[in-house]
Amino acid sequence: MVTDYYLPTLGGVQTVIKAHREALEQAGHEVFVFAPLAAESDDPHVVRLPTARGFAPDGYPFTWPPQAAAESLRRELRARRVELVHVHTEMFAALAGFDAARALGLPVVQTMHGRIDVYTRSVLPLPSVTTMLLAAMHRHRMSHGRARLDPTAPYAGTRMARRMWRLMVSQANHADHVVVPSAHFAAKLVAQGVQTPLTVLSNGLEASVLHAVGSPEPRELRAGETLRVVWCGRLSPEKRPQVFVDALRRLPGTTAEMLGDGVARRAVSAAAADLPDERLTVHGAVPQSQVLDAMRRAHVLVSTSLDFDNQPMVILEGIASGLPVIVTDPDLAEMLPDGGGQVTPTPDAAGLAHALRGLKDAPDRIAAMSAAALAHRAHVAQDTHRDALLDVYRAAMTAAR
C-alpha cells in the first residue's frame, strides 16, 4: 500500500490503511506500507520513502523528491516481491507508486478517499497559486489527458476546483481499478469522467479496534443528566469545527469534547472563548484509543463537515461504540444505520442546535438510536468487507495481464 499519510500522524486515510492491513494479514496475506515518514519505522512492513526535511504541510511528512521516491519504490517492490500496488492518495508518494508499478508491470488499485479540491482550497496558502503549481507538478509525472470534466457541476464551477478534479479523475483513470467508499463520491467521479472499473466498497474497523470498543450498552440520558456530545476530526475549515462551537453556545445544559488538531485550532479556541470552562474541552490531537474513550463518555457524536467528507472513519467508530450520529451533510446519510442517525434540518449552527435539542428533550430517542447503531455494528467491521476488497484485487490483476 502506498500513501502520502501514515501513522503516527492521525487521520482517516491512516486509519483505513491500518484496518486494511490488519484484516488482510489475518487472512494470510503479506502487506507492506510505503509512505513518507519523519523517521524510519521500527515495523519492518512499513517502509519510509524519501521525505522532505523541514517541510510538512498541515503537519504531514512530504514525499520528496519524486524521482527518488519512484526509484526507491521500484527497488523495494521488486525486492519484496510485491504483486499489486494499492494507492491511497494523490500526492507524490502516490505518483511514485504509479511510476514504480508501471515499470514493474504491476496492477494498481486506487482508493479515492476524499475531495482534494475542497481540502486544497481550505488548507493550502494562496490556493489559487499553490493548486496551479501542484497540478503542474502532478501533470509532469502523470498525463491529465484522460480527464473530461463537466464544468456545469456545482462543485466544479471554479477554475481552481476543475484543476483539482482533473487531477483526481486523471489519476483514477490511470489505475486498473478504483475503490470509492461512498456512493455519493463515486457518482461525482463518474460524472466527471472516471472510466476505470469502479467499486463502491465501504471502509471498516479492524478486529483490534472493535475489541478495544468492547460491548457497549445502549446510551441513556437520565433525568437531570447533562447531554454529552463528542466531535472528532481535523480542526480545519473544511470540517467546519466552528459550526459545532456555535451550536453548543445555543444549547445550555450540554457539554462537549473536541478531539483533533489543525490549522483552525486558534479560530476554534477564539470561538469558544466566551463559553464556561466546563462546557467545552478541546483535547487536540490524540491517539485512537483516547477517541474511543471519549466516545464511551458521550451520548451522541456530531459531524459538521459539508460537501467534503467521503466516509469518515470516526462515524464508523461512533456506530461501533453505540453512539447516535448527527451529521450536517446530507451526503453522509447513506452511511447512517436505519434509526441510528439524523441529518440536521439545515447545515448551519442553528440546524445542529435544533437536532441536539430534539435529542435532549426526548431521551428515549437517544436510547432507540443507540440500540439501532449497535445492531448495525457488524456492518462497520473490516472483516465484513475484506473478501470484497480481495475481489477487487483479483479483478485488477486480471485486467493488468
Image: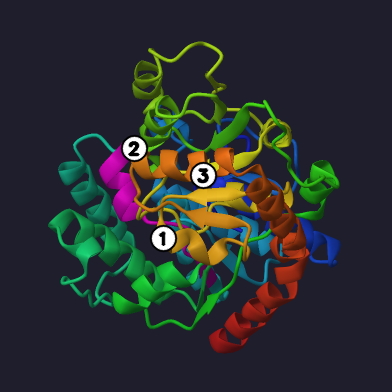
Please identify, in this view, whether the residue under mark 1 or under mark 2 is nearer the observer.
Answer: 1
Query: In the image, what residue type sits under mark 2?
Result: Pro
Whether residue 213 sits left or right of residue 85 in the image: it is right
Query: In the image, what residue type sits under mark 3?
Result: Gly
Residue 106, placed above or below residue 132: below
Q: Position of residue 346 (x, y in %)?
A: 34, 51
Task: Judge the density around disc 1: few (<14), some (14-19), many (≥20) Cα neighbours within 10 Å.
Answer: some
Label 2 sits on residue = 237
Magenta-tinted stretch: 109-123
Is 162 magenta? The answer is no
- Asked if one can make out residue 30 in the rendered structure from this viewpoint, the answer is no
Instruction: Tell me how far mark 1 sits from mark 2, CA to CA.
Output: 18 Å
Q: Position of residue 31 (x, y in %)?
A: 72, 59
Is 113 magenta? The answer is yes
Mark carried by residue 358 = 3
Q: Nearer the viewer, residue 364 or 160?
A: 364
Q: Nearer the viewer, residue 166 or 323?
A: 323
Query: In the image, what residue type sits under mark 1?
Result: Pro
Mark carried by residue 330 = 1
Which quadrant is the C terminus positioned in?
A: bottom right
Task: Judge the density around disc 2: few (<14), some (14-19), many (≥20) Cα neighbours within 10 Å.
Answer: some
Q: Position of residue 16 (x, y in %)?
A: 62, 54
Pointer 1 and pointer 3: residues touching (CB < 8 Å)? no
